[in-house]
Image (tube, rainbow, N blue to C red):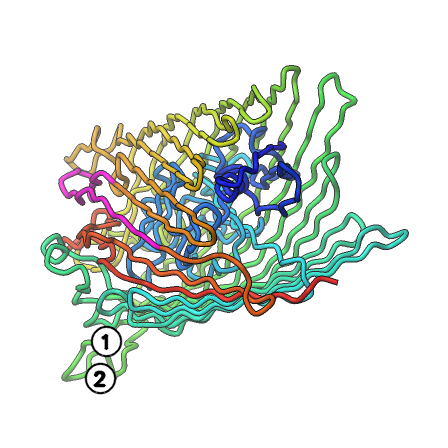
């Protein structure tokens, strides 16, 4: 898709950034020539699991976001900052460094107590999600992210288990310079963050072997401070490096990640009274039990790709290790984890058929191996020693669980797409997944039953879609898709009744979705995106706190739920101002759901606001900018009965800064100052679903000022 953007002096920056950075069609701003108009390169995305494709040819709702283009001065501290304004996507920040943000797409993922569930998360096509569907994202390094591609809907036919939506973080392309540096310092909300990137790229043309080029980058970040609430200290260091080279038509890339967080305190959730009194308060039990986590995470990945639009091949392989020490009120959890996996994908396009035909096939495998130990938490025990706490003053007490947990996932998919006359694209895909769970119990006593067990869950997930590219910059699509989501290994082993072994009655949830929408540009200045859908979920997984076991969660199935939604967004460039607005309407209900004698049919699914409106505006004058952002959310329920409610809220943020010319030769300085929650509203951005002790509410941040300074530099290209 080629877009032609007029380069009027009064709107030069705004229009170029709109055309280059708009969701679903954004890309890095290309160099500006000296002519009267600038032609942008074709925009492509990778989330189709095919050769890079125009999003206007894909039969599902997609969004592509490039940070710092339309909303400059982003801090890259959280996913919520980067994904703001994407309709259908809700990122609930918890102001809790021990708990990852809750990421939901069309309500999938709302049940998560920690990490991300129900949404497939990747980086450059490498899965961050584990084979059982859970995704720890604390180790995701955001400073080196160049764009994000989002599938806003069920995509199991391409991605397999727990693909109620997909977010693929794409790494920033190194600057075409022998050496470039980028240093950013940020301070606000009780935390200080320093990030530094060093990158370089070189290329040369060989007479016979074709193009050879190489690029490398290394990003390191350091985040530390007492945090915005009591008992929310964070101490974390992250490093992400990548090196790539093209040899002929083959591209090779190696990636490595190292994350070390020796202390991330768990400040916990609040009651309604505590929320109203002071959002900075912690859960007192979390302090008494010294609730926190310490994490180390390492990953190495290899990517190989070859081909063009006619035929392409891609292979990936990765291995990761993670150690976790996690004192919680009910126990101290220690996990040593190894993860490995890989994928193969091949695609071919032919015109020998009556209509152009594209065929794609792929295979994904993944293995997760956890050595899990649970100890009694004796942090608050004083006086005489007991069997559970034999050494007073030692936090780790007696062993209460010792087991090995393994999850193996394998899935194969195939997709066929026909380009019919009239710019109509018809595609069909199907995938077969098998997820095997195995637990081996090493701690069997007269009072501890054997928790060993094996369980295998599988599914076939088809999809059918059609796209009509009505104009070069406008398309209409419709699809029927499916999703399959197993319980995680933690959800299968946590049984509220104390029964041994894996939960044999907890079923995977299965989803069928009908969706239709349209997206495109009008006049080169206005981008619109609208989608409507209805999804029916069988056996939806629902969390609840186990009575008399604070912090311990168990899960059950709701018979059937239905989700009807509308998503819309618009972006425009008006002279020297960029404007954006997104709206999400989520009518999500239990259709069949009974717990004992209680019938919750007709009640809203908790944890999801019915209406979410987000707005932003950036005004530019020369090299200065000012940005206003607002999030307005309706209320959301926090329990299955719909009796506990977090109030709706409206929160505004502002920032201003300088993004312009170089100084001292090739160095650039970009200062930013801003304020979050300008009107100092008290609100809960997230809720703990079906919590005990009335600890339902995870507060948003109070008003806070922040400052950021970015320094960039590069050497001259040869």
- Between 181 and 591, the one lying in front of the other is 181
Give how far across and how far down residue 404 sits, in percent: 45, 63
Q: Is residue 665 above or below residue 613?
A: below
Instruction: Please give the range of residues in magenta.
Output: 633-655
Measure how far apart labels 1 and 2 are at the Cα level.
Answer: 8 Å
Which of the 4 image quarters holds residue 233? Answer: bottom left
The image shows residue 520 at horizontal and vertical percentages of 51, 28
Magenta segment includes 48:
no
Give neighbour class at mark 1: few <14, some 14-19, many 20+ (Cα, 10 Å).
many
Q: Nearer the viewer, residue 529 or 185?
A: 185
Q: Who is closer to the viewer here, 115 or 397?
A: 115
Which numbered disc, 1 or 2, marks the residue that appears first in the sequence? Answer: 1
Q: Going 31% across and 39% down the picture, which residue do you hit?
A: 557
Q: Is residue 647 magenta?
A: yes
Q: Residue at x 25, y 72 (%)?
A: 290
* Quarter that holds the N terminus: top right
Whether residue 258 is visible: no
Asked if labels 2 and 1 touch by Cβ distance under 8 angstroms, the answer is: yes
Q: Does residue 43 sit above or below 188 in this rendering?
A: above
Pointer 1 residue: 378
Q: Which numbered circle lies on residue 392?
A: 2
Q: Position of residue 298 (x, y in %)?
A: 53, 66
Q: Residue at x 44, y 58 (%)?
A: 658
Residue 274 visible in the current orientation: yes
Residue 657: mark in rendering:
none
**Left or right of residue 715, residue 27 in this image:** left
């Amino acid at each position: 898709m080629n877009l032609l953007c007029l380069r009027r002096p009064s709107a030069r920056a705004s229009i170029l950034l709109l055309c280059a950075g708009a969701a679903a069609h954004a890309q890095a701003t290309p160099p500006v020539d000296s002519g009267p108009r600038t032609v942008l390169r074709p925009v492509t995305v990778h989330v189709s699991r095919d050769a890079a494709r125009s999003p206007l040819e894909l039969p599902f709702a997609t969004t592509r976001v490039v940070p710092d283009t339309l909303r400059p001065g982003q801090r890259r501290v959280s996913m919520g900052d980067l994904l703001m304004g994407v309709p259908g996507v809700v990122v609930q920040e918890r102001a809790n460094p021990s708990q990852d943000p809750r990421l939901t797409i069309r309500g999938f993922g709302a049940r998560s107590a920690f990490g991300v569930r129900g949404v497939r998360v990747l980086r450059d096509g490498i899965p961050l999600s584990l084979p059982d569907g859970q995704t720890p994202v604390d180790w995701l390094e955001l400073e080196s992210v160049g764009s994000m591609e989002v599938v806003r809907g069920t995509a199991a036919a391409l991605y397999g288990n727990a693909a109620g939506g997909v977010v693929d973080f794409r790494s920033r392309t190194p600057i075409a310079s022998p050496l470039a540096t980028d240093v950013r310092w940020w301070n606000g909300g009780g935390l200080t963050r320093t990030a530094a990137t060093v990158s370089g790229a070189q290329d040369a043309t060989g007479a016979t072997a074709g193009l050879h080029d190489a690029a490398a980058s290394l990003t390191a970040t350091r985040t530390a401070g007492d945090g915005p609430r009591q008992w929310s200290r964070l101490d974390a260091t992250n490093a992400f490096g990548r090196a790539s080279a093209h040899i002929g038509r083959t591209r090779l890339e190696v990636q490595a990640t190292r994350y070390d967080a020796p202390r991330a305190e768990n400040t916990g959730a609040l009651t309604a009274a505590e929320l109203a009194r002071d959002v900075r308060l912690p859960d007192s039990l979390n302090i008494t039990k010294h609730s926190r986590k310490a994490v180390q995470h390492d990953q190495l990945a290899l990517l190989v790709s070859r081909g063009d639009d006619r035929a392409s091949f891609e292979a990936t392989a990765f291995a990761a290790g993670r150690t976790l020490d996690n004192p919680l009120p009910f126990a101290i959890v220690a996990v040593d984890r190894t993860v490995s996996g890989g994928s193969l994908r091949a695609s071919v396009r032919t015109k020998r058929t009556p209509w152009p035909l594209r065929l794609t096939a792929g295979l994904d495998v993944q293995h997760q191996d956890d050595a899990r130990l649970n100890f009694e938490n004796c942090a608050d025990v004083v006086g005489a020693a007991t069997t559970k706490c034999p050494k007073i003053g030692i936090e780790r007490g007696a062993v209460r669980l010792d087991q090995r947990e393994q999850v193996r996932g394998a899935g194969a998919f195939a997709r066929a797409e026909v380009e019919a006359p009239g710019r109509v694209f018809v595609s069909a895909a199907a995938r077969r997944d098998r997820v095997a769970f195995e637990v081996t119990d090493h701690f069997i006593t007269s009072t501890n039953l054997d928790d060993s067990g094996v369980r295998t869950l599988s599914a076939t997930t088809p999809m059918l879609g059609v796209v009509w590219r009505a104009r070069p910059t406008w398309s209409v699509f419709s699809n029927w898709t499916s999703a399959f989501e197993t319980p995680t290994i933690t959800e299968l082993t946590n049984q509220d009744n104390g029964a041994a072994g894996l939960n044999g009655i907890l079923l995977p949830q299965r989803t069928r979705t009908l969706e239709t929408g349209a997206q495109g540009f009008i006049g080169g200045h206005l981008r619109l995106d609208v989608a409507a859908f209805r999804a029916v979920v069988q056996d939806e997984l629902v969390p609840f706190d186990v009575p008399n076991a604070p912090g311990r969660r168990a899960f059950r199935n709701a018979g059937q739920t239905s989700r009807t939604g509308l998503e819309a967004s618009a972006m425009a460039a008006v002279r020297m101002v960029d404007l954006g607005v997104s709206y999400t309407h989520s009518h999500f209900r239990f259709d069949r759901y009974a717990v004992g004698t209680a019938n919750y049919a007709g009640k809203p699914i908790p944890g999801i606001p019915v209406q979410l409106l987000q707005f932003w505006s950036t005004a530019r004058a020369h090299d200065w900018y000012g940005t206003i952002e607002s999030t307005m959310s309706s209320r959301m329920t926090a329990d299955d009965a719909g009796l506990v409610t977090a109030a709706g809220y409206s929160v505004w943020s502002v920032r201003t800064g300088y993004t312009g010319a170089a100084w001292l030769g090739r160095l650039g300085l970009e200062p930013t100052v801003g304020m979050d929650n300008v009107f100092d509203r008290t609100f809960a951005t997230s809720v703990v679903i079906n919590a005990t002790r009335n600890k339902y509410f995870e507060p948003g941040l109070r008003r806070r000022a922040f400052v950021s300074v970015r320094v960039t530099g590069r050497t001259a290209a040869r």
